[in-house]
Amino acid sequence: MFSSFFLKSFRILLLPFALLYWLAIGIRNWLYDNKILRSSSFGFPLICVGNLSVGGTGKSPMVEYLIRLLKDDFKIATLSRGYKRKTIGYALAHEKTTALEIGDEPMQFHIKFPGVPVAVGEERLEAIPRLLDDCPGLEAVILDDAFQHRAIKAGLNILLTECNNLFTRDFYLPTGDLRDLKSSYERAEIIIVTKCNPGLTRSGRKKIIKEINPKAGQHVFFTAIQYGEAYHIKTKETYRLNDRTEVLLVTGIANPKPLKVMLEENSKTYYMLQYPDHHIFTIDDLTEIRKKFGQIESPDKIILTTEKDAVRLVKFDMALTGLPLYVIPVRHDFLFGEEEKFNELVINFIRNFRKTE
């Protein structure tokens, strides 16, 4: 609690830098809004998934949701920046690709959906034509974390904001978590309030919508986190958490709080090794994990990690043999029975786009 208070106090001291940051992004957006800086449109369906803040709103699970929704009816691909990869420039994932080459989240998409092309590239304006050339016949591209990348104008923008940290209540970096103007939400066609309490009431929903103040034509949806059944990182054998299980939680994600809440409700107890977001695990980290796990005396114990972390741990391969290291998948669960409405908006965007060509 003291460290949390210290961090908040320190961030408040950085307010002058936050005001400078606000001024800089304000000027940048003004230049785009007034067409001094140009946004390029493609005669092609581009679906952008993004947010206004740094980390933790559920972009990767939303990209996966869209892939599951579209992959059987359309030929689609994903394009990400490839954050914290060890390479630069455009790259298309192949059978020997690693997370070090394309980043952990794109690697996660590549592993889970082997039939869907996964590409990375910092300069999306250059990467999109190369992706279309490499994958003839594509019918749509999902742009991962591209809302701030205004050099590209997507046809459908899906903006995520976390329920417990709505962009309306946040402030600009480094005092807060915002990396774009609050007013930029107006550029989205769809706004999704994520990580909601599954028991969110309709009156609570109404208050949040009023606070967001959506513009005419904007759609607001609400989702809760839905955890799937844990599976072994190597054997894929499933494991069901229970009130006897003691868990060592190993994470390198921006916001592990929902995971901790889930473990409080579904296990006897848990211990935690927390690493920085997108942390690249080393053999020393694996030694630390083994040591911490060995200190847990219960016979009913496992190590649990996220799918994003798993793609950075799987490289140890043989060293993981015999280790009860399980992976917990996560999905978006639409509240208030609005899943079909969301699905129709996305599918109709692609279909109607094709009709107008």
Image: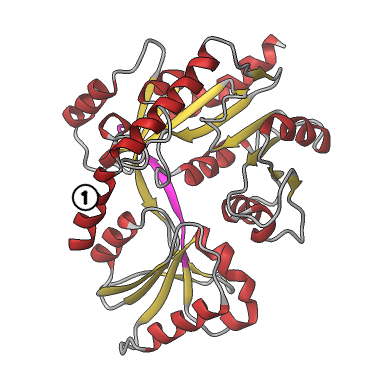
Can residue 23 be found in the magenta stretch?
Answer: no
Looking at the image, which is closer to me, 289 or 346?
289
* Residue toward you, 60 or 38: 38
Which residue: 69% across, 56% down? 101
What is the residue that sits farthest to the front in this orientation?
16
At 29% from the left edge and 65% from the top edge, which residue is drawn? 263
* 113 in relation to 267, above or below: above
Where does the image place residue 131, in percent across and percent down from the top left? 76, 36
In the rendered structure, the answer to whether residue 299 lies left or right of residue 318 reads left
Q: Which residues are magenta?
A: 327-337
Residue occupying image coordinates x 54% and y 23%: 156
The quadrant holding residue 268 is bottom left
The part of the image, by quadrant, that contains residue 44 is top right
Q: Residues within 10 Å of mark 1 (few under 14, many from 20)?
A: few
Q: Quadrant of the C terminus?
A: top right
The residue carrying mark 1 is 9
Residue 233: horizontal and vertical position, in percent?
A: 55, 70
Q: Amino acid at mark 1?
A: Ser
Magenta-colored segment: predominant secondary structure: strand
